[in-house]
Amino acid sequence: MAEQALVIDPRDSVAVAVEELAAGSLCTVRVGDDPVTLEIMEKIPFGHKFALRPIAKGENVIKYGEVIGEATADIGPGAWVHVHNVVSRRAKERVREGAGE
C-alpha cells in the first residue's frame, strides 16, 4: 500500500499528508524505522500537516527536522496543523520587531 503521509526527520512533530485523509481514518506513517499508527481527528487536505503526538501550546512545531513555528493552542495527535493553531516563527519575530519601532 502506498504511504498516505510522510515524515522526513524522526524529530518531526508533524507528518505531511500525500493524499486527502478523512476524519476518523487510521493512518500509518514511518517515523525513522518505526511505524506509527494514529487516528486522523479531522479532514486533512493533501499537502497539509497533522500532529504525530501531542503538541502543547507554546511548543515548537517541527517539520523536516526544522522548527517551522509555535503552537498557539494545544494540538492533539491526528489533528490538522495549520494557521489556526500555529504561528510562523518568522511572522512572530516580525511582529516583535515592528512593535519596537
Image (cartoon, grey):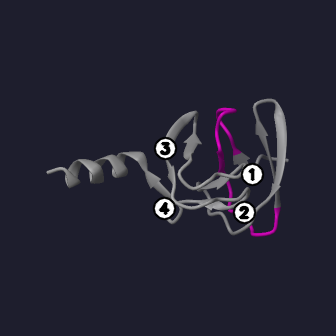
Q: Secondary structure at mark 3?
A: strand
Magenta region: 6-25
Q: Position of residue 79 (x, y in %)?
A: 68, 61
Q: Which residue is mark 1?
A: 4
In the displayed structure image, the side of residue 8 where residue 85 appears, left or right: left
Q: Nearer the viewer, mark 2 or mark 4?
A: 4
Q: Position of residue 33 (x, y in %)?
A: 81, 30
| Residue at the image position 85 percent from the left and 47 percent from the top | 1
* CA neighbours of label 2 inside 10 A, class few (<14), some (14 to 19), many (20+): many
Q: Which residue is mark 3?
A: 68
What amino acid is at disc 1? Answer: Gln
Q: Nearer the viewer, mark 2 or mark 3?
A: 3
What amino acid is at disc 2? Answer: Leu
Q: Nearer the viewer, mark 1 or mark 4?
A: 4
Q: Is residue 45 above or below residue 97?
A: below
Q: Which label's residue is closer to the chain start, 4 or 3?
A: 3
| Residue at the image position 69 percent from the left and 43 percent from the top | 6
Q: Secondary structure at mark 2?
A: loop
Q: Position of residue 3 (x, y in %)?
A: 77, 46
Q: CA distance from mark 2 to mark 1?
A: 8 Å
What amino acid is at disc 3? Answer: Ile
Q: Which residue is mark 4?
A: 83
Q: CA distance from mark 1 to mark 4?
A: 22 Å
**Quick check: marks 2 and 1 in contact, CB under 8 Å?**
yes
What amino acid is at disc 4? Answer: Val
Query: Picture quarter containing residue 10?
Result: top right
Q: Which label's residue is closer to the chain start, 1 or 4?
A: 1
Camera-side residue: 56 or 53? 56
Q: Secondary structure at mark 4?
A: loop
Q: Which label's residue is closer to the chain start, 1 or 3?
A: 1
Q: Which residue is mark 2?
A: 21
Query: Picture quarter containing residue 39?
Result: bottom right
